[in-house]
Amino acid sequence: MPFAGASPSFFHPWRELAGDRWRVVPVELPGRERRILEMPYRNVVEAAKNAVDDIVADLGAGARTVLFGHSLGAVLAYELVHLLGMRDVHVERLVVSGSPGPWTQRERRSGGGTRPRRVGSAR
């Protein structure tokens, strides 16, 4: 998941590094690259709910995957773990960077989520 202001092309070099070992599938959000004319999301929960259909279609039901997100992408990836699990996509690992843990008490959260946060396995 791209960080705030980033686009899927940020992850293109990762494809070469991954080779045939795994498939890198960046998520393209509204307001970025080919979707530049679309209104960007202002709420990460809404973004996750609207992105999950495309992700499931790309991965396929029953797929096993690892999610990575940095900064705002970390918050988006966290929200997607729950949604993908409800859609028969098994998230084996959630890897995040550049974001405080979901247990932090911040006055203003970038995610806008209301779900209680739990740290641990994404299973």
Image (cartoon, grey):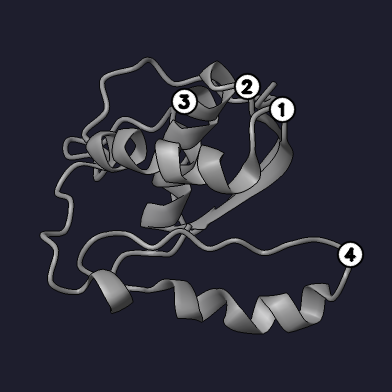
Apparent side of residue 7 relative to residue 70 in the rendered image (left or right): left
Label 1 amino acid? Gly
Q: Identify residue for label 2.
A: 88
Quick check: marks 2 and 3 in contact, CB under 8 Å? no
Residue shown at 16%/58% (left/top)?
40
Position of residue 63 measured from the top left corner of the image (x, y, whole percent)? 72, 35
Describe the element under mark 4 as helix, strand or loop: loop
Residue shown at 31%/30% (left/top)?
105
Describe the element under mark 3 as helix, strand or loop: helix
Label 3 amino acid? Leu
In this view, 86 is above or below 8: above
Q: Identify residue for label 3.
A: 83
Per the model, the C-alpha gap separating discs 2 and 4 is: 23 Å
Dot label at residue 77? none
Apparent side of residue 86 relative to residue 18 in the rendered image (left or right): left
Q: Which of these two is toward me, 71 or 88?
A: 88
Label 4 amino acid? Arg
Q: Nearer the viewer, mark 2 or mark 3?
A: 2
Quick check: marks 2 and 1 in contact, CB under 8 Å? yes
Q: Which of these two is toward me, 25 or 72?
A: 25
Per the model, the C-alpha gap separating discs 2 and 3 is: 9 Å
Position of residue 3 measured from the top left corner of the image (x, y, whole percent)? 40, 64
Position of residue 26 measured from the top left corner of the image (x, y, whole percent)? 53, 63
On the image, which quarter does residue 79 sit in?
A: top left
Describe the element under mark 2 as helix, strand or loop: loop
